[in-house]
Structures are given as C-alpha cells and as structure tokens.
Image (spheres, grey):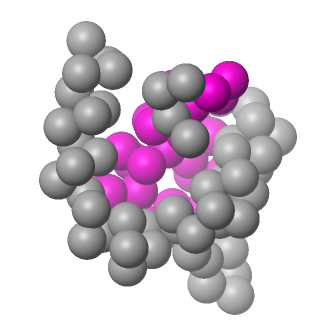
C-alpha cells in the first residue's frame, strides 16, 4: 500500500497529515501541494482499503484500525521518508 506501490509515497504523506487532524480533499491537496484530483484518487484508494474513513461531508480521518497501528506506520514512514 505504501512502500512498494506506485503512489505509495503520496498516500504516506496523506496518512501523515490525517494523523494530525481531519481534512477534506481540498485542504489536503493544498497542504501537500498536490492536484485536487490526485488527492481525491489517493483518498479513494485509502478509503477502499479501510485505512481511512470519512464523514458525510467528506472530511477524512484515520480509521480505528489505522489509529491502532499508528506507531507501526510512523516507524515505517520514518524509514521510507529519509
């Protein structure tokens, strides 16, 4: 999902941002300096895999499972993001 996939790096940045606070697609695109469509695509991938969830108004946040494994993600992200 992250290290060995095309787009994994962008998804890692998105997860890193969502660990701080919830965002909508536009806010994430601006915060990461990426195209809105790119942000939307990666949010869909993460949501379809149960890594993030969203509210009715499309505010995205980490899923309960991802929150439970956030320390593992942070360790992996540190190694990837050197």
What residue sits 22% from the left and 42% below the top? 74
Position of residue 4 relative to residue 59, above or below, is above
Q: x and y percent of residue 36 in the render? A: 76, 41
Q: x and y percent of residue 41 in the render? A: 78, 46
Q: Which residue lies furthest to the top in this view?
A: 82
In-image side of 65 versus 9 (left or right): left
In-image side of 76 versus 43 (left or right): left
In-image side of 63 versus 81 (left or right): right
User: Does any portion of residue 32 appear in the rendered image?
Assistant: no
Q: x and y percent of residue 54 in the render? A: 60, 77
Place residue 48 in its image quadrant. Answer: bottom right
Place residue 44 in its image quadrant. Answer: bottom right
Magenta-colored stretch includes residue 26: yes
Magenta-colored stretch includes residue 68: no
User: Which region is colored magenta?
Assistant: 5-32
In-image side of 37 versus 65 (left or right): right
Q: x and y percent of residue 81 in the render? A: 31, 19
Position of residue 62 relative to residue 12, above or below, is below
What residue sits 49% from the left and 44% below the top? 14
Position of residue 19 relative to residue 60, above or below, is above
The chief SS type of the magenta part is helix
User: In the rendered image, which quarter contains the N terminus?
Assistant: top right
Place residue 7 in its image quadrant. Answer: top right
Observer-nearest of 67 and 3: 3
């Amino acid at each position: 999902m992250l290290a060995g996939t095309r787009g994994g790096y962008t998804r890692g940045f998105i997860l890193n941002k969502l660990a701080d606070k919830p965002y909508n697609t536009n806010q994430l695109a601006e915060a990461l300096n990426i195209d809105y469509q790119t942000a939307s695509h990666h949010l869909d991938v993460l949501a379809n895999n149960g890594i993030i969830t969203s509210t009715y108004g499309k505010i995205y946040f980490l899923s309960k499972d991802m929150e439970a494994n956030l320390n593992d993600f942070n360790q992996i992200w540190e190694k990837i993001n050197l």
